[in-house]
Amino acid sequence: MPPDAPAIPAPDAVPAAAVRYRCRHVTRYAYGEPVTSSQLLAHLAPRPHPRQTVQGAALVLAPQPAVAVDRLDWFGNPVTYAAVQTPHRDLTVTAELEVEVRAPALSDPALTPAWEAVRDAAPDLPETAEYLYASPRVPAPDEALAGFALPSFPEARPVALACLDLMHRINADFAFDPTATTVSTPVREVLAQRRGVCQDFAHLMIGALRALGLPARYVSGYLRTEPPQGAASWRGAAAGHAWVQAWCGTADGWLDLDPTNDVTAGLDHVTLGWGRDYDDVCPLRGVILGGGMHTLTVEVRVEPLSAAG
């Protein structure tokens, strides 16, 4: 693909204007010793936004929690706090949801502002300022990350074209390898070994953009389990997925970019929430009393119910 070619589907490549999905996400913990109590924080409900309407969402825990409270977090994502006070050796968390996802209204990347203009304006905007700086999983900007990003950002290049080019390069130069990293692998190690999974590629792209002074945020969600007929198989569809939103200026807003699959996120991407990095939207985290060693299994299924032209 030429460097300036936008990764935007042609009209005949998008068969529907919207798709309705049913999603089921099951997490099972099996403990070696009894757990007397568990406290959990779940980012497993979908976030409404201009391209996504939530038709329904339910979260079921077994054993049943004594306390369950729904709220919005700092970033506006739905989150559930639950406390299980029944002694148990197994814990199952099942999230079921239905959403309608609409195709993005993408502007011409070549008509977006020069990336330097976006960089200079970003620190003064309340919607972007907190996505400019270091966060728990994305290091402070440094020369290595800036040097990796710069070939995509020559002087005065339109910001969306530059971000698309960076996405293409990550997809081309990094191998998808579920065995190469863990949830705690540092971004600089991913950059050095050029291997990882969707979470790693999202953090890498966010770090590279922030190193140039451009706002970027992490999106947690799902991919359609089976790709549309005739489409290539998705990477990262077997479990939760992650991608990036890059700020392209006040007029164009946030652009959803999936470096794992080298596409702009669209009809096949279901959004749970967004934040500075994975830590802000971790699907499940918590504290337990007891338990010893444990095993974890995760199953995700995202199936289309209908499509509207």
Image (tube, grey):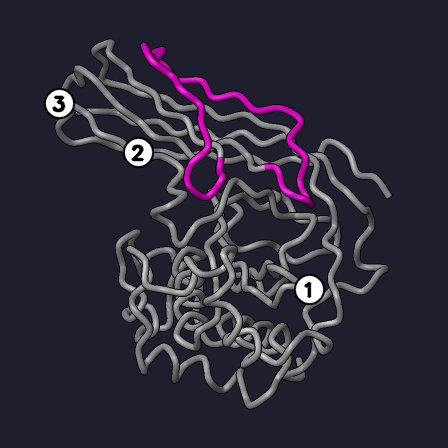
Residues marked 1 and 3 touching at CB (< 8 Å): no
Where is residue 104? Give x, y as percent: 72, 54
State the separation of the CA atoms marked 2 and 3: 16 Å
In percent of the image, x 24 and y 21: which residue is there? Answer: 38
Q: Which residue is mark 2?
A: 296
Task: Tell me the quarter of the picture where residue 139 sits.
Answer: bottom left
Crowding at dot 3, Cα within 10 Å, few <14 / some 14-19 / many 20+, comes out as some
Q: Is residue 110 magenta?
A: no
Position in image of residue 247 (x %, y %): 56, 64
Residue for point 39% across, 53% down: 277
Looking at the rendering, in which quadrant would you find the C terminus?
A: top right
Q: Earlier in the sequence, mark 2 or mark 1?
A: 1
Vertical arrangement, residue 35 with respect to residue 240, above or below? above
Identify the element where label 3 is drawn: strand
Residue closest to the eye, 10 or 179? 10
Q: Amino acid at mark 1?
A: Ala
| Residue placed under numbered mark 3 in the picture | 290
Q: Nearer the viewer, residue 24 or 75?
A: 75
Q: Position of residue 54 (x, y in %)?
A: 64, 31
* Residue 222 image point, x, y percent: 54, 43
Q: Residue at x 36, y 77 (%)?
A: 145
Q: CA distance from mark 2 to mark 1?
A: 44 Å
Q: Earlier in the sequence, mark 2 or mark 3?
A: 3
**Mark 2 is on which residue type?**
Leu
Which span of residues is magenta-colored? 48-77
Q: Residue furthest front?
A: 124
**Labels 2, 3: front one:** 3
Answer whether residue 58 is magenta in the image: yes
Q: Disc 1 marks which residue?
A: 251
**Which quadrant holds the N terminus?**
bottom right
Q: Give the residue at x 50% y 76%.
A: 120
